[in-house]
Image: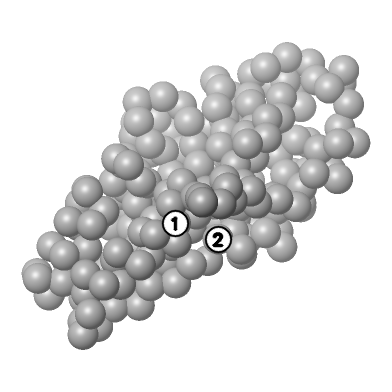
Amino acid sequence: MTETIIRSHGLEPLVNVISQSNNSGSGISIRIDSQVGHLNLRADCSDNDCIEALESQLGQSLPTTPNTLSEGEHRIYWLGPDEWLILTDLSQAALLMEKLRKSVTGKYVALNDVSGGQIVLRLDGTGVRDLLAKGCTLDIHPRVFTAGMCAQSGLAKANVLIGLAGQSESFDIVVRRSFSDYLLRWLLHGADEFGVTIEQA
Protein backbone atom coordinates (compact mmCIF):
# COMPACT_ATOMS: atom_id res chain seq x y z
CA MET A 1 0.00 0.00 0.00
CA THR A 2 1.36 3.42 -0.97
CA GLU A 3 1.73 5.79 1.95
CA THR A 4 0.73 9.41 1.36
CA ILE A 5 3.42 11.81 2.55
CA ILE A 6 2.24 15.09 4.04
CA ARG A 7 4.78 17.55 5.41
CA SER A 8 3.99 20.49 7.66
CA HIS A 9 5.73 23.66 6.55
CA GLY A 10 5.95 25.09 10.07
CA LEU A 11 4.39 28.44 9.18
CA GLU A 12 0.83 27.44 10.06
CA PRO A 13 0.72 29.48 13.32
CA LEU A 14 1.72 32.65 11.49
CA VAL A 15 -0.63 32.06 8.56
CA ASN A 16 -3.52 31.31 10.90
CA VAL A 17 -3.26 34.67 12.68
CA ILE A 18 -3.15 36.68 9.46
CA SER A 19 -6.55 38.21 8.88
CA GLN A 20 -7.51 37.85 5.24
CA SER A 21 -9.73 40.90 5.68
CA ASN A 22 -6.59 43.00 5.93
CA ASN A 23 -5.47 42.01 2.45
CA SER A 24 -5.77 45.04 0.21
CA GLY A 25 -5.79 43.17 -3.06
CA SER A 26 -3.94 40.50 -4.95
CA GLY A 27 -0.99 42.30 -6.48
CA ILE A 28 1.22 39.58 -5.03
CA SER A 29 0.36 36.04 -4.01
CA ILE A 30 2.65 33.98 -1.79
CA ARG A 31 2.28 30.20 -1.96
CA ILE A 32 3.85 28.17 0.82
CA ASP A 33 4.68 24.84 -0.80
CA SER A 34 5.53 22.12 1.70
CA GLN A 35 4.86 19.18 -0.64
CA VAL A 36 8.19 19.57 -2.42
CA GLY A 37 11.21 17.33 -1.95
CA HIS A 38 14.63 19.01 -1.91
CA LEU A 39 17.59 16.91 -3.06
CA ASN A 40 21.13 18.27 -3.01
CA LEU A 41 23.35 16.70 -5.67
CA ARG A 42 27.12 16.98 -6.11
CA ALA A 43 28.85 15.27 -9.02
CA ASP A 44 31.89 15.61 -11.24
CA CYS A 45 30.84 17.41 -14.44
CA SER A 46 33.91 16.09 -16.25
CA ASP A 47 32.66 12.51 -15.83
CA ASN A 48 30.37 12.27 -18.84
CA ASP A 49 29.17 8.74 -18.01
CA CYS A 50 28.15 9.86 -14.54
CA ILE A 51 26.29 12.94 -15.77
CA GLU A 52 24.52 10.95 -18.50
CA ALA A 53 23.41 8.32 -15.96
CA LEU A 54 22.00 11.01 -13.66
CA GLU A 55 20.23 12.84 -16.47
CA SER A 56 18.74 9.56 -17.72
CA GLN A 57 17.07 8.99 -14.34
CA LEU A 58 15.99 12.62 -14.03
CA GLY A 59 14.56 12.72 -17.54
CA GLN A 60 16.11 16.13 -18.15
CA SER A 61 19.46 17.88 -18.33
CA LEU A 62 21.44 19.16 -15.40
CA PRO A 63 22.03 22.90 -15.95
CA THR A 64 25.73 23.57 -16.41
CA THR A 65 25.58 27.29 -17.20
CA PRO A 66 26.06 29.29 -13.99
CA ASN A 67 22.88 30.69 -12.40
CA THR A 68 20.43 28.81 -14.60
CA LEU A 69 17.78 26.19 -13.97
CA SER A 70 16.32 23.23 -15.83
CA GLU A 71 12.56 22.76 -15.81
CA GLY A 72 10.78 19.52 -16.61
CA GLU A 73 9.38 16.88 -14.28
CA HIS A 74 11.65 18.50 -11.70
CA ARG A 75 13.11 21.95 -11.19
CA ILE A 76 16.88 21.69 -11.04
CA TYR A 77 18.88 24.70 -9.91
CA TRP A 78 22.59 25.27 -10.59
CA LEU A 79 24.32 26.01 -7.28
CA GLY A 80 27.95 25.66 -8.36
CA PRO A 81 30.20 23.94 -10.93
CA ASP A 82 29.51 20.55 -9.33
CA GLU A 83 26.37 21.16 -7.27
CA TRP A 84 22.62 21.29 -7.94
CA LEU A 85 19.35 21.50 -6.03
CA ILE A 86 16.57 19.26 -7.33
CA LEU A 87 13.01 20.20 -6.40
CA THR A 88 10.59 17.36 -6.99
CA ASP A 89 7.24 16.07 -5.79
CA LEU A 90 7.63 15.12 -2.13
CA SER A 91 5.90 11.77 -2.64
CA GLN A 92 8.49 10.80 -5.27
CA ALA A 93 11.62 12.17 -3.59
CA ALA A 94 12.68 8.94 -1.84
CA LEU A 95 12.21 6.85 -4.99
CA LEU A 96 14.13 9.38 -7.08
CA MET A 97 16.97 9.33 -4.54
CA GLU A 98 17.18 5.55 -4.79
CA LYS A 99 17.19 5.58 -8.60
CA LEU A 100 19.87 8.25 -8.78
CA ARG A 101 22.11 6.46 -6.28
CA LYS A 102 21.84 3.12 -8.07
CA SER A 103 22.63 4.73 -11.41
CA VAL A 104 25.99 6.07 -10.22
CA THR A 105 27.26 3.27 -8.00
CA GLY A 106 31.01 3.56 -7.66
CA LYS A 107 31.07 7.17 -8.89
CA TYR A 108 32.11 10.24 -6.93
CA VAL A 109 28.60 11.52 -6.20
CA ALA A 110 27.00 12.98 -3.06
CA LEU A 111 23.22 12.97 -2.87
CA ASN A 112 21.35 14.20 0.20
CA ASP A 113 17.70 14.79 1.02
CA VAL A 114 17.57 18.28 2.57
CA SER A 115 13.77 18.62 2.47
CA GLY A 116 13.53 18.95 6.24
CA GLY A 117 15.75 22.01 6.29
CA GLN A 118 14.30 24.12 3.48
CA ILE A 119 11.00 25.49 2.25
CA VAL A 120 9.79 26.99 -1.01
CA LEU A 121 7.84 30.25 -1.18
CA ARG A 122 6.41 30.86 -4.64
CA LEU A 123 5.68 34.50 -5.42
CA ASP A 124 3.43 35.61 -8.27
CA GLY A 125 2.16 38.98 -9.36
CA THR A 126 3.01 42.26 -11.01
CA GLY A 127 4.69 43.65 -7.91
CA VAL A 128 7.06 40.75 -7.18
CA ARG A 129 10.15 42.28 -8.78
CA ASP A 130 9.62 45.56 -6.92
CA LEU A 131 9.16 43.66 -3.68
CA LEU A 132 12.37 41.65 -4.13
CA ALA A 133 14.28 44.81 -5.04
CA LYS A 134 13.47 46.22 -1.60
CA GLY A 135 15.69 43.70 0.15
CA CYS A 136 17.93 42.09 -2.46
CA THR A 137 21.10 43.41 -4.10
CA LEU A 138 20.51 41.36 -7.27
CA ASP A 139 19.36 43.25 -10.34
CA ILE A 140 15.82 41.88 -10.70
CA HIS A 141 14.95 43.99 -13.75
CA PRO A 142 13.19 41.87 -16.42
CA ARG A 143 15.91 42.71 -18.95
CA VAL A 144 18.53 41.22 -16.60
CA PHE A 145 16.85 38.48 -14.56
CA THR A 146 14.96 36.46 -17.14
CA ALA A 147 13.10 33.14 -17.26
CA GLY A 148 15.40 30.20 -16.65
CA MET A 149 17.71 32.10 -14.32
CA CYS A 150 18.48 31.54 -10.64
CA ALA A 151 20.88 33.01 -8.10
CA GLN A 152 21.84 32.64 -4.48
CA SER A 153 21.68 35.93 -2.63
CA GLY A 154 20.54 37.70 0.49
CA LEU A 155 16.93 38.81 0.83
CA ALA A 156 16.49 41.12 3.80
CA LYS A 157 18.60 39.23 6.39
CA ALA A 158 18.02 35.73 5.04
CA ASN A 159 20.16 33.73 2.61
CA VAL A 160 17.97 32.48 -0.23
CA LEU A 161 17.94 30.88 -3.66
CA ILE A 162 15.83 32.86 -6.13
CA GLY A 163 14.65 31.26 -9.36
CA LEU A 164 12.39 32.31 -12.22
CA ALA A 165 10.92 29.40 -14.19
CA GLY A 166 8.66 29.46 -17.21
CA GLN A 167 7.47 32.60 -18.94
CA SER A 168 5.40 34.03 -16.10
CA GLU A 169 6.42 36.29 -13.24
CA SER A 170 6.51 33.32 -10.85
CA PHE A 171 9.54 33.36 -8.58
CA ASP A 172 10.68 30.51 -6.34
CA ILE A 173 12.31 31.58 -3.09
CA VAL A 174 14.08 28.68 -1.37
CA VAL A 175 14.93 29.50 2.24
CA ARG A 176 16.04 27.62 5.33
CA ARG A 177 13.11 26.67 7.56
CA SER A 178 14.74 28.43 10.50
CA PHE A 179 14.49 31.72 8.58
CA SER A 180 11.11 31.09 6.94
CA ASP A 181 8.97 32.75 9.64
CA TYR A 182 11.16 35.86 9.56
CA LEU A 183 11.22 36.00 5.76
CA LEU A 184 7.48 35.53 5.38
CA ARG A 185 6.85 38.37 7.85
CA TRP A 186 9.27 40.56 5.89
CA LEU A 187 7.58 39.70 2.60
CA LEU A 188 4.12 40.44 4.00
CA HIS A 189 5.25 43.80 5.32
CA GLY A 190 7.03 44.70 2.08
CA ALA A 191 4.11 43.59 -0.09
CA ASP A 192 1.51 45.57 1.82
CA GLU A 193 1.49 48.39 -0.75
CA PHE A 194 0.74 45.94 -3.56
CA GLY A 195 -1.86 43.84 -1.75
CA VAL A 196 -0.98 40.28 -0.81
CA THR A 197 -2.68 36.93 -0.45
CA ILE A 198 -1.27 33.71 1.04
CA GLU A 199 -1.90 30.19 -0.21
CA GLN A 200 -0.79 26.90 1.32
CA ALA A 201 0.01 23.65 -0.47
Task: Identify the residue at horizontal 86%, vertical 45% (top origin).
Answer: 13
Name the image quarter holding residue 166: top left
Which residue type carries mark 1? Ala
Residue 63, image x and y in percent? 24, 54
Residue 61, image x and y in percent? 20, 51
| 130 up-or-down from 80: above or below | above
Residue in front for this viewpoint, 18 or 143: 18
Which residue type carries mark 2? Ser
Task: Identify the residue at horizontal 67%, vertical 59% (top origin).
Answer: 177
- For disc 1, the marked residue is 93
| 66 up-or-down from 141: above or below | below
Task: Identify the residue at horizontal 56%, vertical 22% (top origin).
Answer: 125
Q: Left or right: where does residue 54 sit relative to residue 74?
A: left
Q: Left or right: where does residue 94 sit relative to residue 14?
A: left
Say which label, 2 or 1, has the lower sequence index.
1
Rendered image: mark on residue 26: none
Kindly give the residue lying farthest to the front in the view shown: 1
State the separation of the CA atoms marked 2 and 1.
9 Å
Whether residue 81 appears in this view of the structure is: yes
Residue in front for this viewpoint, 95 or 147: 95
Whether residue 155 appears in this view of the structure is: no
| Label 2 close to label 1 by CB (< 8 Å) | yes
Q: Left or right: where does residue 7 sit relative to residue 73?
A: right
Residue 14, image x and y in percent? 84, 43
Q: Look at discs 2 and 1 and give the one toward the viewer.
A: 1
Number of other residues with Cα within 10 Å of mark 1, as a class: few under 14, some 14 to 19, many 20 or more: some
- For disc 2, the marked residue is 115
**Label 2 residue SS:** helix
Task: Identify the residue at horizontal 53%, vertical 66% (top origin).
Answer: 114
